Image (cartoon, rainbow, N blue to C red):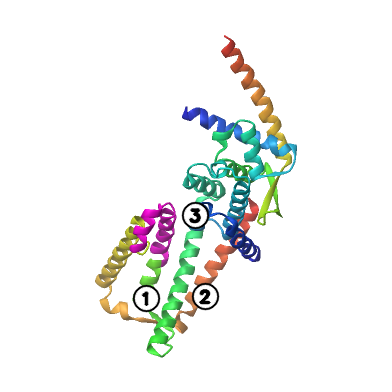
Amino acid sequence: MLLEWRFKQIRVKQQKKLNESNLYLYKRITSYIQNSELRGIEKEEILQQVVDMMLQAQIEDKSMDLIIGNDYEEFCKSIIEECSSDKDKNYRMLNYIQKGLLGMILILASLTISRGILNSSFNLGVTVDYLLIASVISFVLLPAIKKSSQESASLTFWNKKFYTVNKGLTKSGANAFVLMIVTVVFIRFILGKTLSTKVFHYTINLYSAIPYVVLILLIIGSIEIYKRIYNKSI
Amino acid sequence: MANSTQILKGLLEGCILKIVSNHETYGYKICERLTVYGFQEISEGSVYPILIRLEKKKLLYSNMIKSSLGPMRKYYYLTKEGYRELEDFISSWDKIKKNIDNVLEG
């Protein structure tokens, strides 16, 4: 974690040495790599090498094609592919579950806090509706937004201007948003039919949910341990 | 000629092993060396992903050292397996080269 932070500090400082067009290319690469499923330290190691090679090419007045090629998306894709080549399906699935659960807990915590501030009372509990929305955002919308951010990294200047007007929502980002709404409506429909619509307003009290929260945190922790052992063994 | 590009990309792995075996080096220098040897278009954009692959295969290992330009730079070295792989590559290439020369000379 500390090393990752240190690398980031160096990179942010050094990237300022790049000229305007190289900085633009570098930012596109950064956006692509940052929105991948690689581990934080892997991303930083890659970007550290990219900025170093780009700086050297700039100083020697060489074309960036020498390092990046003429298609930086292909360059990023092949880097991500090579870095992920030793991660099997189980690893990827557990990684997805871990990030989803972590995201869900953070979203629920933020919702509870903001509700407490708005209502000036801290009722430590979440409604089933909140739980549903947080799960769908975390497991469907956020991964799709990440993918969409990789796409938007390849936008040209004019496209970028256009998308800025549209709050940066790319086609797949918009699809993800629609998918999220459809998923929420579908689950609500099923729950509403099988149980009752009253179930959505049922508040799950934090104190009664503590065993489940602990269980979720244990799952997140266990996955993290599995990932670390896995990465050390390869 | 798409296939020939693929073949050449495969051969790049062997060439990179050879360059690293001469002395410790880093990504940019390897790109530069390959350009000097005439691999300009093939090596463009593919050297760094190949370095990651070779490191994952444990044919190379690396050390991060702060470069004179500021960022942390990865210096690559050959592992024992890397040296073995390089020897295999050289002997395979000798055979292939000989066979192709025979075919071309008719």
Whether residue B56 sits left or right of residue A79 in the image: it is right
The vertical placement of A18 against B105, above or below, is below
Q: Earlier in the sequence, mark 2 or mark 1?
A: 1
The image's mark for residue A130 is: 1
The vertical placement of B47 against A110, above or below, is above
Q: Label 1 is found on which chain of the structure?
A: A
Provide the residue designation for mark 3: A24
Q: Quadrant of residue A104?
A: bottom left
Res A88 visible: yes
Q: Are marks 3 and 2 on the same chain?
A: yes
Provide the residue designation for mark 2: A214
Name which residue type carries label 2.
Val
- Residue A232, image x, y percentages: 65, 55
Which dot, 3 or 2, sits closer to the camera? 3
Whether residue A43 sits left or right of residue B66 in the image: it is left
Gap in angstroms between the C-alphas marked 2 and 1: 19 Å
Based on the picture, tell me whether residue B92 belongs to the magenta stretch.
no
The vertical placement of A68 against A200, above or below, is above
The image's mark for residue B6 is: none
The vertical placement of B5 against A164, above or below, is above
Name which residue type carries label 1.
Tyr
Q: Residues within 10 Å of mark 2 (few under 14, many from 20)?
A: few
- Residue A227, image x, y percentages: 58, 59
Q: Quadrant of residue B8?
A: top right
SS at badge 1: helix
Q: Earlier in the sequence, mark 3 or mark 1?
A: 3
Which dot, 2 or 1, sits closer to the camera? 1
SS at badge 2: helix
- Residue B9, image x, y percentages: 56, 34
Q: Which residues are magenta?
A: A138-166
Q: Residues within 10 Å of mark 1 (few under 14, many from 20)?
A: some
Name which residue type carries label 3.
Tyr
